[in-house]
Image (tube, grey):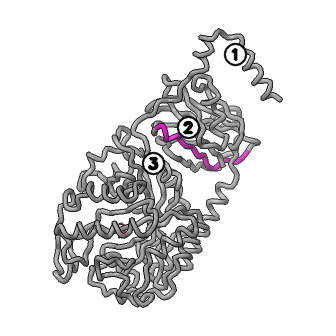
Amino acid sequence: MLRSFRLRLLHLSCLLLPAGLLAQTTKVAPPAPVLPLPTPQQLAWHEMEMNAFVHFTTNTFTDLEWGYGDEQPAIFNPTQTDAGQWARTLKETGFKTMILTCKHHDGFCLWPSKYTEHSIKHSPYKNGKGDIVREASDACKKYGLKFGVYLSPWDRNRADYGSPSYVTYYRNQLKELFTQYGPVFEMWFDGANGGDGYYGGARERRRINGATYYDWPTTLQMVRGIQPNVIFFSDAGPGVRWVGNERGVAGETNWNTISTDTLYAGKPNINTLLNTGSPDGKQWVPAEVDVSIRPGWFYHAKEDSEVKTPEELFDIYLTSVGRGSTLLLNVPPDRRGLFHENDVKALRGFAALLKKEFAKNLALKAPVKADSYRGKQPAFAARNLTDGNKATYWATDDDKTTGNFEITLPANSTVQYIVLQEYIKLGQRVKTFTVEAWQDGDWKKITEGTTIGYKRILKIAPTKTNKIRVNITDAKACPVISNVEIY
Ligand code: FUL
């Protein structure tokens, strides 16, 4: 009723306004983007939020983290491998993807590559007819996960590691993986290189020039030629960057932007820079938070009692997804080829905790008003913050880099989490903000933060209130916020 009355009023005023003025009041363009911007693939990657890593190789059987490269393929003998169990468990517990270590630093290949004998084709597994890359990618398709590959550039098995022919070998393997196993959403190549290795029997230390040896631009161009949508992870991107630690902690200030031409191995404080990004970064290269559910990346029976608890995983969720990154959680199959019972239990407990903590969004469809909104246009009004639609947003006029909005909760409620999301399609903007709760007839500051980005989750001490106010106190340009949730 009220709605149709307002519409009619608007209609009437249109008739009464002179044409020139009408054009002026109705035509407010959306905010200009703040560069750099994410690509459509990066945007989709942000929305995945939770990804899984699967580390599996001869290390699982030798109890090592970094195989030397002299392991016999015969030791790789999982007796009950079920990639369906991995994918099903991940799907049920909220993960969107699975990235498999197709080849780790030891050089052993989980698929029967035609370019090496150091592979599963010489393992007892399925009498040498097994292909775990195939099983994993098929399981991902079956359970609706995206599939990604980890192919270690450092190869401690290859006799020619360090010479140009090895780079050709590496590229040939990428061609196999990218042409034979369906869509690959992300390719993971890490910079680890410990120097020493078996190297076809040479058993020596080898140094490569990390800046030039692999000629990455040529390799990436080749892979893009096969699958243009793939996202490349490395310490410096270009698709997504390393977060600078393996503890599961993104920067509290976390810019998706960084200048990749200023990054180099050995740069002072590089891990801090990767952790926070930089507000004036020239490229959009968001941080991915890789961390293992156990102390090691590979399965070790002695770590069965050290699996992270659901509460620890939840804390990691808050310091990764809750700080505008995506989580890449490693779950290593055991010697049977299955996720261990303890890991499955922890994952289920974590999923249940997520469900419990974020059970009811008190802000959904709640009344909300802003101190101002862009051109007084409904398209940019505060209502867009709580409409449950991330494609709509609240924005201010261009001359403002601050602004606030206030949400009235259904009743006096206990609040513990505030979720904020920027509309990053138009760039990352917010530099600082505060959050207040209405208590005893006054606004009380309950938390504050710096960046928001794709998503920011703030955990606060349980607070009884019926109104929450968010103040954007500084931004690179007019704030553009797509979503707010309160739990
Ligand atoms: C590192 C590797 O050295 C570890 O073994 C593990 O694969 C981790 C994800 O990346 O660089």
Question: What residue is pinned by disc 3?
Answer: 252
C-alpha separation, residue under disc 2 versus residue under disc 3: 19 Å
Q: Within 10 angstroms of label 1, few (less than 14), some, or many (20 or more) residues?
A: some
Is residue 430 among the parts visible in the rendering?
no
Residue 251 screen position, x and y as percent: 42, 50
* Residue nearest the viewer, comparing 195 with 473: 195
Write down the quadrant of residue 392 in the picture. top right
Percent across and percent down for residue 428 are: 46, 39
- Residue type at mark 1 is Cys
First reached walking from the N terminus: tag 2 or tag 3: 3
| Neighbours of disc 3 within 10 Å: few (<14), some (14-19), many (20+) | some
Q: What's the amino acid at mark 3? A: Glu
Q: Quadrant of the N terminus?
A: top right
Specify the farthest residue to the right. Answer: 1
Identify the residue shown where x is 58% and y is 15%: 24
Mark with earlier residue (1, 2): 1
Instruction: Write down the region rendered in magenta.
Output: 413-426
**Residue 178 is a magenta residue:** no
For disc 2, the neighbor class at 10 Å (few under 14, some 14 to 19, many from 20) is many
Mark 2 lies on residue? 481
